[in-house]
Image (cartoon, rainbow, N blue to C red):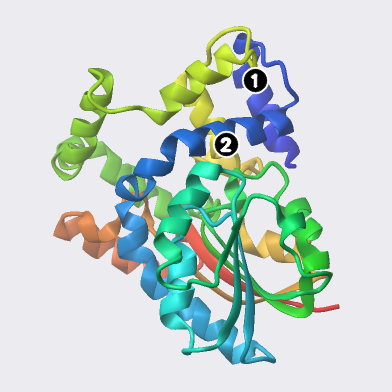
Amino acid sequence: MSSTNTDFLQDILKPYQPQLEIAQLVVELNKLFHKFDAKDYDRQHPEIHQQLPPIWQEMIGQAIDVAETSVWRILDFGCGTGFEAEQLIRNMPEGSIAELTCYDPSPEMLACCQTRIAPLFPRAVFTSDLNSTSSGERHYNLLVTNSLIHHLPDPIGTIDNLMPLLMPDAIWLAGHEPSSRFYKNAECLKLYNDFLRQRKWRKFLYFEKYLSAFKQKIGLTANPLKQVAEEAFHRGLFNKQPSTLVIDRIVDFHVAHSFEEAASGRGFDFEIMQQDLIDKWQLVWVKTYSFMGPYYEKDLPEKWSHLSHKISHNFPKDGANFSAAWKRYD
């Protein structure tokens, strides 16, 4: 776990008097968040379904190109509502998937995944306990994750713990993670800040977002961050109920929000990850995107869409999100 994240959270958590160590707090609050967020996750993240399918098609193509097999035994780790499993089923060669195990510690997320995936691949296994389903050591030759590792207190350690389940030449497709490189790039950050200053555009573009926030405020729809804050306080995880902002920062544990945070080490940089993983994984493909921070470029007015497209050509490694393909070697 990053000491930067630990120091950062200790400062913002101090007024709320947490009763767990930070690593365990990250785990427990993520469980609560995904419990409350499961039923609305897909609706609240339309950009995933608009933006990511072509990227997953590219990643799957890379896996096929570099693999030493044409038969896939897949572990979808942190399967969520089943997005990445669906991409694999729809885009891998017909009949090439021998096994598909969908794992998630959230029963609510796992139920959504089963509803979505079982009709597409009836032989899929859905579990919150990998020990009960593993066929033995070195079994899976494809590990897939999507929008997962930034929720983990120790991403590298978590992947290391999965190694006994993976074949020596396994592929890991890691989709849609936040990149701190975006905030370290002065030109990308300037364009983003210029956009943010255009308040009229933000209000125009994100009327639905403002409407959603208003509905949450008056109680017409649930706010999962507020629900987590209340439940965590009720369970005694804090001596004072935390704000929704604090919950958000703990749940999205490895997400940088500024140059200062990125410069101090908060967040992911795929080149640094390659160094951290150098003894076990080789980076074989990476793609960065989202050159207007959390705002989806295709939803922007023409001016900002054009500018974000232009800067993506100038700095192709520095989008706010990235997806990557890794190949294991022993």
Please report whichever mark, 1 or 2, sits nearer to the chain's N-terminal start: 1
Mark 1 residue element: helix
Q: Residue 175, relative to residue 235: is it above or below?
A: below
Labelled disc at residue 264: none
Indicate the quadrant containing the N terminus: top left, top right, bottom left or bottom right: top right
| Quarter the C terminus occupies | bottom right
Amino acid marked by disc 1: Asp
The answer to whether residue 207 is seen in the rendering is yes
Label pair 1/2, CB-CB below 8 angstroms: no
Q: Nearer the viewer, mark 1 or mark 2?
A: 2
Left/right placement of residue 263 relative to residue 244 reads right
| Residue 16 on image: x %, y % | 60, 11
Asked whether, in this view, residue 199 is left or right of residue 164, the answer is left
Question: Which is nearer the eye, 158 or 86?
Answer: 86
Question: Which element carries disc 2, helix, strand or loop?
Answer: helix
**Residue 302 shown left or right of residue 25 in the figure:** left
Counting labels gives 2
